Image (cartoon, rainbow, N blue to C red):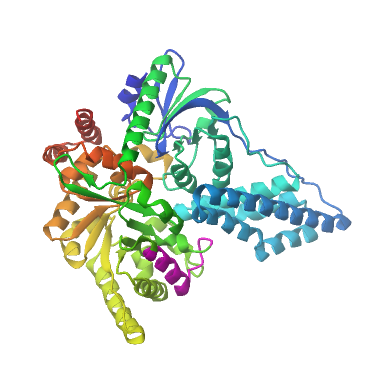
Amino acid sequence: MSENIAAHADRPSRPEKGWKKNKVAAHASGEDAYRGIGTSRGIAIGAAYAFEKEQYEHENKVIAPDEAEQEIERFLEALRRSEKELKKIERVTTRKLGKGYANLFEAQIMLLHDPVLIESITNRIRTELKAASLVIDEEFGKYLEQFMNSDDQFFQERACDFRDIKERIIRNLHIKKLHSWIPEGSIVVSEHLSPADVILLSRSNVKGFVTDTGGKTSHIALICKSLNIPMVVGLGNFSQLVSTGDLLIIDGESGTVVINPDQKTIEYYTGKRDEALRFDADASLTAEQPAYTRCGVRISFFSNIDFKEELLGIRATGSEGVGLFRTENLFIDGTKVPSESEQLNYYLEMAETLAPMPLVVRLFDIGGDKLLYSPVREPNPNLGWRGIRILIDVPEILESQLRAVLQANVHGNIHILLPMISSIEEIRFIKETLDKLCSAIREEKGHAEKPFIGAMIEVPAAVEMIAEISREVDFVSIGTNDLTQYTLAVDRNNVIVQDLFDKFHPAIVRQVHRVITTAQKNRCRVSICGDMGSDRLALPFLLGCGLRKFSVVCADIAKLKKLVSGITLAETEIVANECLQLDSAAKIKGRLEEYLAAL
């Protein structure tokens, strides 16, 4: 069966009756293989648990006028019960993952206290004499419809939050107990899961998660990565095909899911899993040691992080600093711009924790949807007002962040990274603003250490301008996720075209090679912070192109260091040049797999 999976893995497939056709192989024994999006690496073999949230029939009856206050009290009590649950989940999250991820639930608790939402629901119960559950469904439905129809990842995450809160309140109206314990060692299969579901279900030593919806950058995907639980998302109507107790295999790296595998397939994946575990165990023994290739060249690995709490264990992973800190996570409840003093304290604590290791602070990579005063609703936010464009157009946001960085840079280890750069003018504007603010702070406080400036290379225009950009900045960082999306015109979170989103497409590997070689020619430091940097298959290609600095998820550093130790750069240079001549992603991946198999 494993041969069948490999043979069909690159076969293009298109939508059928509104769903993605994810089935890639079938077998006479009755097993079927499906392909989704692998979002958290690892292999899991176990019994499926079909997780379905209880649905409640809305009470469509008209309530009597003298029952309205009682119905309102039911609603308020449901809010109190929901808050109690979320605080419990927040505590569990803090214990498992730290305060950073726990803030997701703090934002939901804030929504439970939203005076506008509460007043709207209570007034409608009182005036329209409708049951609380019906009014809650209708009020939340207004927001959900807007969020679900958005192409923007932020709005899609907000839809997940709103759906979870709505379902939680309605369940508590019926005084039903939270369903959070399932059989130990299950693989959870569901249409959709919220961050709260993943946190609570993980207490049952869940082996893996499979969902019909979702993307690589969703909150649940990031949580599973942090918990080291394999996950595959974007499988269309897969949850309708699985029953509790079905034997499943999931591969969180390739995105493959097998239902009722035969013995040969079980042995194949068991061997693959055990080999990966042995590799990880060996890698962990030398994780904190510097990484050198077999031929003695030093390779550096840094961390991509979202919250300062992640710094606590950063040295143990073998990381040499932070290569990407996504500051947009500082936005309170996703919309309120953090103040200068809040940012200063946050950056200062991070810089002091890391010193003398570097902290690369990416300026706010936000879309207009995150600004409360955004004047328009954009039809396509990913190609609209976002990233550097907002920072230039809204100087109070830019200058507040730059002032905070300048004042926090007391150890000289903070660098700034500019998001979504597409022109030289954007870089020069930021440099001029930084110079102006730096002079003002020096006059006021006597000293300000100006940080190094870097540019994200994540749109095709930046690749075309790489010669000019790399002469204008101190370093560049390749963001392969957006670069792939914009170059191939494929939304990475759209399950219908997910098979077209491929970082090994010839256009992508040639762009990456061009950026690396041109930047180095101009003596500009270059690193990679996108998903390609964490991919073991891409490692020999990137090294062969001349890349020596990687910024990746902490959990991947030890494995990549271990792999580096067996590589000879002269060989990777030959392989990289061969890959640049190939005309398909399948051929490029095949050549890289051949090289790694021979190590």
- Along the horizontal axis of the image, is 323 left or right of 378? left
Q: Please report the bounds of the magenta region as a residue range.
A: 333-352
**Residue 293 % position (x, y):** 18, 42
Viewport quadrant of the C terminus: top left
Q: Nearer the viewer, residue 44 or 274?
A: 274
* Magenta stretch, main secondary structure class: helix
Identify the residue at image location x=36%, y=86%.
444
- Along the horizontal axis of the image, is 346 left or right of 428? right
* The quadrant where residue 542 appears: top left
Viewport quadrant of the N terminus: top left
- Which residue is most to the right? 66
* The quadrant where residue 535 appears: top left
Looking at the image, residue 430 lies above or below residue 569: below
**Residue 194 % position (x, y):** 55, 45
- Along the horizontal axis of the image, is 158 left or right of 407? right
- Which residue is most to the top? 28
Looking at the image, residue 32 lies above or below residue 405: above
**Residue 64 % position (x, y):** 87, 54
**Residue 272 % position (x, y):** 35, 26
Based on the picture, tell me whether residue 234 belongs to the magenta stretch.
no
Identify the residue at image location x=44%, y=21%.
32
* Residue 377 seen by the camera: no
* The quadrant where residue 286 appears: top left
* Residue 548 seen by the camera: yes
Query: Count the marks: how many?
Result: 0
